[in-house]
Image (cartoon, coloured by chain):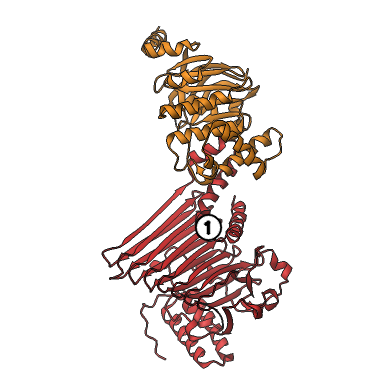
Amino acid sequence: MAVVLQNKPRKQSPVAQKTIAHYVSLSEKINVQAENQVLVAKRQAAQKKLQSLGLPTRRDEDWQYTSLTPWMQEQYEQKLPGRVSFEQLSDFLPAFETLRMVFVDGVYAAELSSDLAALPKGLDVEQTDATNAALADSEEPFEILHDMLAERQVKISVAKGAMIELPIHLVYLQTQAQQLTNLTLQVELAAGSQATVLQQAISFDENNSSFVNGFAQFSIGEDAVCQQVMVQDMNRKSFYFANQRIQQAARSHFNTLYIGLGGLISRHQNRLTLCGEHAEASQNSIVLGAGKQVMDSRTQTDHNVPNGSSQQLHKFVLNDQARGVFNGMIYVAKGAQKTDGQMDNKNLLLSNEAKMDTKPQLEIYADDVKCSHGCASGQIDEDQIFYCQARGIRRPDAVQLITQAFLLEPLETVGNFAIREWLKSLVNRRLIAVR
Amino acid sequence: MLLKVENLHACVAEDESKKILKGLNLEVKPGEVHAIMGPNGAGKSTLSSVLAGREDYEITEGTVDFDGEDLLEMDAEERARKGLFLAFQYPVEIPGVSNKLFMQTAVNAVREERGLPALDMFDFDEFAQAKIDLLNMRKDLLDRSVNVGFSGGEKKRNDIFQMALLEPKLCILDETDSGLDIDALKVVANGVNSLRSPDRSFIVVTHYQRLLDYIKPDYVHVLIDGQIVKSGGFELVHELEKQGYDDIIESHQAQQAG
């Protein structure tokens, strides 16, 4: 199959070449055992793409601040899942009830999950071989990797008008060293339906380095309402790359919150398209980095039709030598009049060595729109600290109080009280550890 | 003696050539209300800041004894825990931190120092509501972020509310009256008056006599060029009002020159 590429091939370092060879060989191994020939061909096409284009280098504008070199030091592979008891897992779980699906090292663990035979009416969860529709078929490097390694997929469908009250909870638990978890998710909300999707990427211990590569597609039907939260709380030796594509039909609401707490290098990317009029999107981040973590959160928001509205608030707190990266683009197509697009990135640097690179962008081809973008990075306000101290609050407590208030602001977009309180406790646990 | 300031010299921490306090003496006994007046630039706010423990100033000479302990050895938070309270000239906004959380943390910090058990959410609410009623504050005060979106008057009232909650031994009001209209001024003065007690002292630092008309201090000191050059009773306020600072400044300068 001939592959026509949009992007130019990159010059590759020896370690990058070795990395590509490793993942291509993993992909070939999957293909040898595979029966689905369509998927085999897709994986082969992806292999060729990666071999031709190479992995991004610091010369790529989109990867300038997020080096992949540390990730290339280990060769990750899909393994047989480790053993985890429900007791061990329960430490990570919220107290409220969810429709839980647990994936240990990328493999579905029925014994740790809710009974999928007893799902509420209107909700369907399928686990099948990855389908064509579940592949990214793009030139984004980690989407190519996803397609190369795609095997199984989860498809969540919510029927027309169905209101799913319990959160659909996907837990991705990594238990082994050099573990590669390749995730394929499709979420489809039919017209007028409502659902909450809660995702959690976690590590079982602090030392085993793992690599999670996620690809998810959300299709939000007319008048449908979807709340998504992704909590990335892996250990500080692991790597997390996730690409999400979201399509919104008319009058739909999509609200997504990324909580980035763990990982040595992590990158969460939304590509959201408003396809129907009067759709509303809310994209937010809470990111906390310390040590030598590199935390990257980015959004691409395409207003293709008139009367769309999108709002974003991305907050980063960085300590030690941590680095944060934000990149957001709001694109307004010609004719997408009355678009309302707001994007804000605010960052708090707790140490002199911490660094934030941020690039909010607007690209507007319509002439009657209301769009704004802004960013601000700064240190904690000494006057605020002194005010607390003058009331008897010790300096470290004052720093925590102020930092917590700053960082948790995007949580206000989560409507459910129990979920909000649980997320707050997850962030606070890391915040106390950062002190 | 609650507070004894002796021969206090202080300069700007970043620039030692900027000497602001130049041998200041002050004694405050429990239950007394002292006013410190003086022209702009005399060192009034520096005195408040130095006593509260702001690190922008360096003490080059002198001692401050607070309730039998060396005040200058303590961090700002320790001073607050031991019962010193500063009402700010410009109370600071802290977005996202509710007054409730802020003050519960502060009250429990002070209670810890006094060997009292921490107040839980319910006990604190009850305690705070009583103070809100006492000072006639707005009911939603606790739910709002600390000083965010408050008018100048509301911010100062919030500081007085905090003072009521922390029950300090010594309250320093740093030009609390600046920028207040007459109604807000009355509220602040009423707050102070309702908190007066035999074991609580006040130092009211101000540029104007207006606030003092409502508070009626026991002692009035005139601070000029980093020193207290004249002290007296409440009558001194009106003397200053009539004559201004010019005469005092002149005689001080003559004395310095001589």
Chain A colour as displayed: red
Q: Nearer the viewer, residue A160 or A290?
A: A160
Q: Nearer the viewer, residue A409 or A231?
A: A409
Q: Residue furthest top?
A: B258
Q: Nearer the viewer, residue A129 or B147?
A: B147
The image quarter containing residue A370 is bottom left
Q: Is residue A4 visible?
A: yes
**Left or right of B198 on screen, residue A362:** left
Q: Amino acid at mark 1?
A: Leu
**Left or right of A200 on screen, residue A327:** left
In percent of width and height, residue A299 lies at 43, 66
Number of numbered callouts drawn: 1
SS label for mark 1? helix
In percent of width and height, residue B158 lies at 51, 35
Image height of A264 relative to A82, above or below: above
Q: Residue furthest left?
A: A367
Q: Nearer the viewer, residue A221 or A331?
A: A221
Q: Is residue B249 visible?
A: no
Image height of B156 relative to A41, above or below: above
Chain rendered orange? B
- Give the position of the N terminus of chain A as an image quadrant: bottom left
How packed is label 1: few (under 14 Cα within 10 Å), some, or many (20 or more)? some
Q: What chain does badge 1 belong to? A: A
Residue at label 1?
A411
In percent of width and height, residue A312 lies at 43, 60
In percent of width and height, residue B184 lies at 45, 30
